[in-house]
C-alpha cells in the first residue's frame, strides 16, 4: 500500500484487463431504461450492463426530477421522491440511514456508476459525499439477490447513483448557490429554570451551499470537473422530552469536495473512463441531543476509478465492462481514535447475445480492505479482509412477451463459499399489464466493524463469532400502464396513467443487531430470525393543462405496508416484536404542477409508530412532514428556486433521542451556459 492511489489503481487496472475474462450474458437493450447503453454512447450518464425489461421492482429518478426537488442530499431526494423511510440523527452532515423493505443501509448495496460504494468497514454510506448537481439519475432496485449489477449483500435492494460523465460537444459551465434558514425563536438554555435565550436571527442564514462545474466535449473525448462546499450551523429549535424549547448546538458541519472525470473513445466499440473524487468534512457531534459538549470528527476520502466499457464486440454478439477503484479514507474522532482505511474494488461483467431470445451474462467482483486503527483499546489495530464472488445468469424468451431469468452467484470471504441463486420471470400479459415474479436467496457476511470494532471507552465492541445473515425471499409485481388502453391512448388531456403494485416477503436467519448487555456494553449479536412481509401501491396520473398542453399536473400518491417480526428465544409471531426503525405504514403523495418555465411541487410523507430497540420498549411517535418546492427559469440560463420543508413545523424524532428541524426555507439560484463550437449546428447558449 506504499504506492500512491493513482499508481495502485493503474497497476490493478492493468492486471484486471490482462486477466482471462469469462464470457458472459448480455441483452437486447430497451426496457425500462430506454436502452441506456454506456457512458461512451449516451450523454445522460453511465449504466453498466443494462438488463432488458428486468424482472425486479425498479424505480428511476431522472435528472429532471432531481432538478425540480433541489434536494440537499441523496437521503432527502429518496424520502421525498420515493417515500423511502430515512432515519437521521440531525440536519445536514449528520448520519442518515436508508431503508428498503425494512432493511437498513448496511443491507442495501449502494453503487456509484455501478461500483460498490458502501463503507467496507461498517456497510454504511455517507450521503453528504454526493454532490447532487453531479447526479444524472438514480436507479432503485427493490429486493434481494440483484441480477442487474450482481453485487453481494443486497438483502433489501440496490441503489445505483449515476453521475454525469460524457459531455456534449462544446463548453459547459454551471453553478448553484443556496441559503437555508430556520425559524428563530426564544428557547431555554437549560432544561428548566435556566436563562432564556434568543431569538437568534443568525439562524436565518444557518446553512449555505455552493457548487460549480465545467465541462468540455469533443469528438473523441470529454472532461468534466466540479467543486462543492457546505457550511451548516444546524442551529434549529426543537422541543425536548420535557416540552421545553431548545436550540440545537455543538452540531456544526463544514465540508466540501470535488470530482474530475475524463472519457476517451477508443474506437467504435469501446470507451475508457477515469474518475477521481475527493471529499473532506469537519463535524461537531453533541454528546447528547441536549448537550452543549461536543466531540470533533474529521473525514477525508479519496477515490480513483478506472473503467473500460465495450458494449458491442465481435459482430455485436458480446459486450463487456471492467473497472477497478482504489479508495483511501482517514477518519478522526475525538482526540484518541483515528483510522486509515485502504479499499480496492475490482469487477468484470460480460454479456453474450447467444441468439435471439437468449442472453447469457457472467462476471466476477473482488474487494480488499486494509484497516489501520488507532485506539487505546484496540488489541489488533491492523486488519485485512477479502470478499468476492462469481456469477452466471441466463435470460431466455421462449415465447413472445415472456422472459425467464435464472441466476446463481457464488460468494466468498476466503473462509467459506456460498451459492446465492435467484429465479424470476417477466410476462407482458396485455398491452396494459406486466407481471414480474422473483424467488431468491438473501445472504450477507457480517460487516468488518460488526466483527472487530471497539470504542475508546469499551462501551461498544464487535463480535468475531458472528454468523452470516442468510434467508430467502420472493416478490410479485404488477405494472399497469393504463394510458395504453384504447380509450385513453389518443387522449389530449391524459398524458400518462399507471399503477404499480408489489407484494413481497422475506426472512433472514441469524439477523444481526447491536444489543446492550446487562453489564452496559453494546455488541452485535445474531438475535434470531427476522421475517418481513408487505406490499406497496403507487398510482400515477399526469394531465395536460393549458393551451396545446404546455402545462402539466402530476399526482403520485403511494402506500407502503410492511409487517416485521423479530423472533429470538421463546418469541413467536403472536408476540409481534418489530424490527427496529421499521414503520408498519408509510403514506406519501406528490402534486407536481409544471409550466413552460418552471414548476411547483407539494409533497407529504407520513410514517406510523417505529421502535428504536429489539424489545420494542422505545416507541417513536408517528410523524407527518409536508414540503413545497418552486422553480422558475429567468432568461436563458438562470433558474431561481425556493423550498419550504416541514411546513407544518412537525416535532418528531427520526432517531431515538434526536429531534429533527422544524420549518426551514431554502432560497437559491442556478445558472448554466452551454456554448457549441462554431458551425456545429447548436445554439450559442442555452439555459436549464
Image (cartoon, helix red, strand yellow):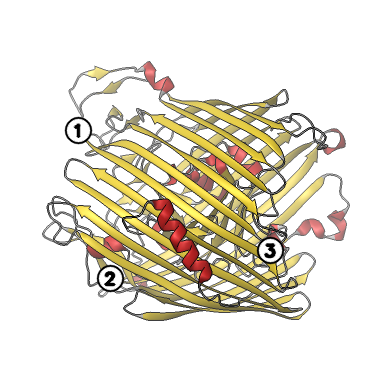
Q: Earlier in the sequence, mark 2 or mark 3?
A: 3
Neighbour tally class for label 1: few under 14, some 14-19, many 20 plus, Cα within 10 Å: some
The image shows residue 494 at horizontal and vertical percentages of 80, 47
Question: Based on the displayed image, in which of its 4 quarters is residue 445 positioned?
Answer: bottom left
Do the residues bearing badges 2 and 3 touch, measured as CB atoms within 8 Å? no
- Quadrant location, the N terminus: bottom left
Is 4 placed above or below 412 here?
above
Neighbour tally class for label 2: few under 14, some 14-19, many 20 plus, Cα within 10 Å: some
Q: Earlier in the sequence, mark 3 or mark 1?
A: 1
Q: Is residue 146 visible?
A: no
The image shows residue 421 at horizontal and vertical percentages of 51, 79
Q: Secondary structure at mark 1?
A: loop
Q: Earlier in the sequence, mark 1 or mark 2?
A: 1
Question: Based on the displayed image, in which of its 4 quarters is residue 254 positioned?
Answer: top left
Q: Secondary structure at mark 2?
A: strand
Label 2 – label 3 distance at C-alpha:
37 Å
Q: Nearer the viewer, residue 631 or 330?
A: 330
Q: Nearer the viewer, residue 404 or 361?
A: 361
Label 3 – label 1 distance at C-alpha:
52 Å
- Quadrant location, the C terminus: top right
357 relative to 193 in the view: left or right: right
Q: How many marks?
A: 3
239 relative to 670 in the view: left or right: left
Find residue 479 and name its label.
3
Q: Secondary structure at mark 3?
A: strand
Residue drawn 72% across and 49% down?
A: 541
Residue underneath mark 2 = 526
Residue underneath mark 1 = 293
The image shows residue 252 at horizontal and vertical percentages of 32, 31
Amino acid at each position: 500500500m506504499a504506492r500512491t492511489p493513482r499508481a495502485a489503481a493503474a497497476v490493478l487496472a492493468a492486471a484486471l484487463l490482462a486477466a482471462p475474462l469469462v464470457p458472459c450474458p448480455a441483452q437486447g437493450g430497451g426496457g425500462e431504461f430506454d436502452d441506456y447503453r454506456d457512458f461512451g454512447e449516451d450523454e445522460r450518464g453511465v449504466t453498466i450492463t443494462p438488463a432488458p425489461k428486468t424482472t425486479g421492482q425498479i424505480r428511476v429518478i431522472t435528472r429532471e426530477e432531481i432538478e425540480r426537488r433541489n434536494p440537499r442530499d441523496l437521503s432527502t431526494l429518496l424520502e421525498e421522491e420515493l417515500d423511502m423511510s430515512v432515519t437521521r440523527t440531525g440536519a445536514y452532515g449528520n448520519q442518515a440511514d436508508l431503508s428498503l423493505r425494512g432493511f437498513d443501509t448496511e443491507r442495501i448495496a449502494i453503487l456509484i456508476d455501478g461500483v460498490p460504494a458502501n463503507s467496507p468497514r461498517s456497510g454504511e454510506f455517507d450521503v453528504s459525499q454526493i454532490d447532487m448537481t453531479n447526479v444524472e439519475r438514480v436507479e432503485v432496485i427493490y429486493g434481494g439477490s440483484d441480477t442487474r449489477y450482481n453485487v453481494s449483500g443486497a438483502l433489501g435492494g440496490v441503489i445505483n447513483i449515476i453521475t454525469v460523465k460524457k459531455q456534449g460537444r462544446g463548453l459547459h459551465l454551471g453553478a448553484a448557490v443556496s441559503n437555508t434558514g430556520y425559524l428563530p425563536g426564544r428557547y431555554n438554555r437549560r432544561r428548566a429554570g435556566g436563562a432564556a435565550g434568543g431569538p437568534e436571527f443568525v439562524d436565518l442564514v444557518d446553512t449555505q451551499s455552493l457548487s460549480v462545474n465545467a465541462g468540455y466535449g469533443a469528438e473523441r473525448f470529454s472532461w468534466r470537473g466540479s467543486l462543492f462546499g457546505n457550511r451548516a450551523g444546524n442551529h434549529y429549535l426543537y422541543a425536548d422530552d420535557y416540552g421545553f424549547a431548545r436550540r440545537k448546538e455543538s452540531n456544526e458541519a463544514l465540508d466540501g469536495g470535488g470530482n474530475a472525470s475524463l472519457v476517451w473513445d477508443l474506437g467504435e466499440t469501446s470507451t475508457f473512463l477515469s474518475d477521481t473524487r475527493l471529499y473532506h468534512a469537519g463535524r461537531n457531534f453533541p454528546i447528547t441531543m441536549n448537550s452543549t459538549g461536543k466531540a470533533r470528527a474529521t473525514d477525508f476520502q479519496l477515490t480513483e476509478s478506472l473503467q473500460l466499457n465495450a458494449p458491442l464486440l465481435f459482430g455485436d454478439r458480446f459486450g463487456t465492462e471492467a473497472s477497478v477503484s482504489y479508495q483511501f479514507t482517514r477518519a478522526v474522532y475525538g482526540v484518541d481514535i483515528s483510522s486509515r482505511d485502504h479499499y480496492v474494488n475490482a469487477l468484470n461483467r460480460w454479456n453474450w447475445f447467444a441468439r435471439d431470445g437468449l442472453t447469457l451474462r457472467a462476471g466476477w467482483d473482488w474487494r480488499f480492505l486494509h484497516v489501520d486503527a488507532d485506539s487505546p483499546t484496540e488489541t489488533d489495530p491492523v486488519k485485512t479482509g477479502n470478499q468476492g464472488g462469481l456469477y452466471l445468469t441466463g435470460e431466455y424468451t421462449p415465447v413472445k412477451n415472456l422472459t425467464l431469468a435464472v441466476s446463481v452467484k457464488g460468494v466468498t470471504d476466503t473462509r467459506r463459499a456460498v451459492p446465492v441463486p435467484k429465479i424470476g420471470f417477466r410476462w407482458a400479459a396485455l398491452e396494459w399489464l406486466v407481471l414480474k415474479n422473483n424467488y431468491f436467496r438473501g445472504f450477507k457476511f457480517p460487516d468488518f466493524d460488526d466483527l472487530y470494532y471497539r470504542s475508546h471507552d469499551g462501551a461498544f465492541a464487535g463480535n468475531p463469532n458472528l454468523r452470516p445473515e442468510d434467508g430467502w425471499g420472493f416478490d410479485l409485481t404488477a405494472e399497469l400502464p393504463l394510458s395504453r388502453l384504447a380509450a385513453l391512448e389518443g387522449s389530449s388531456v391524459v398524458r400518462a396513467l399507471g399503477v404499480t403494485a408489489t407484494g413481497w416477503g422475506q426472512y433472514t436467519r441469524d439477523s444481526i443487531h447491536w444489543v446492550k448487555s446487562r453489564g452496559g456494553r453494546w455488541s452485535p449479536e445474531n438475535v434470531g430470525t427476522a421475517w418481513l412481509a408487505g406490499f406497496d401501491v403507487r398510482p400515477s396520473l399526469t394531465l395536460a393543462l393549458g393551451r396545446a398542453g404546455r402545462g402539466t399536473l402530476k399526482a403520485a400518491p403511494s402506500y407502503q405496508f410492511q409487517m416485521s417480526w423479530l423472533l429470538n428465544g421463546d418469541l413467536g409471531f403472536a408476540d409481534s416484536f418489530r424490527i427496529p426503525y421499521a414503520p408498519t405504514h408509510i403514506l406519501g403523495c406528490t402534486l407536481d404542477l409544471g409550466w413552460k418555465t418552471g414548476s411547483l411541487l407539494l409533497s407529504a410523507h407520513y410514517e406510523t409508530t417505529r421502535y428504536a430497540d429489539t424489545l420494542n420498549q422505545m416507541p417513536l411517535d408517528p410523524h407527518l412532514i409536508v414540503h413545497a418546492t418552486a422553480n422558475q427559469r429567468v432568461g436563458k440560463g438562470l433558474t431561481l428556486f425556493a423550498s419550504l420543508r416541514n411546513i407544518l413545523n412537525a416535532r418528531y424524532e427520526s432517531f431515538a433521542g434526536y429531534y429533527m428541524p422544524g420549518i426551514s426555507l431554502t432560497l437559491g439560484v442556478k445558472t448554466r451556459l452551454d456554448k457549441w463550437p462554431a458551425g456545429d449546428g447548436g445554439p450559442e447558449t442555452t439555459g436549464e
